[in-house]
Amino acid sequence: QVQLVESGGGLVQAGGSLRLSCQASGSIFSIDRMGWYRQAPGKQRELVARITTGGSTRYADSAKGRFTISRDDAKNTVLLQMNSLKLEDTAVYYCNVIGNNWSFDKWGQGTQVTVSS
């Protein structure tokens, strides 16, 4: 079993910053990609950013230039630094971790990010 623990969500004013953290534990032999998704009320879940073992990253257009994803493989942790937050960034953010050869595909419980004016 793989467990994910997310932290770092909260309430922030527009223009502010937050850092999300997600740590994986349990029956982990190797992790392929780690990423962050978000879901706003009434909308579908969407990719925010993801990072592979080799360090390749992919960002949603809305996140480019403002968000930075990074990972610490020694700690099985993925971070999402979010700067210049906007009202439209308000959503529940979910961590996703995929094992090599798709050995597992795990979602976190979600952490609320609320950006106020």
Image: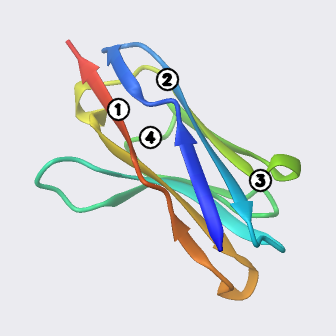
Residue plotted at (72% across, 87% down): 101
* In this view, 96 is above or below 59: below
Q: Position of residue 91 (x, y in %)?
A: 28, 41
For marks 1 and 3, the one nearer the N-term is 3
Per the image, the residue denoted by label 3 is: 76
Residue plotted at (37% across, 42% down): 62
Which numbered dot is residue 63?
A: 4
For marks 2 and 4, the one nearer the N-term is 2
Amino acid bearing label 2 = Leu
Q: Residues within 10 Å of mark 4 (few under 14, many from 20)?
A: some
Of labels 4 and 1, the one closer to you: 1
Q: Image check: 7 left or right of 37?
A: right
At mark 3, the secondary structure is loop
Q: Image check: 31 left or right of 87?
A: right
Give the residue at the far right of this rendering.
74
Amino acid bearing label 1 = Val
At mark 2, the secondary structure is strand
Amino acid bearing label 4 = Ala
For marks 2 and 3, the one nearer the N-term is 2
Q: Position of residue 2 (x, y in %)?
A: 65, 68
* In this view, 30 is above or below 112: below
Q: Position of residue 90 (x, y in %)?
A: 27, 34
Q: Residues at badges 1 and 2 in contact (C-beta under 8 Å)?
A: yes
Per the image, the residue denoted by label 1 is: 113
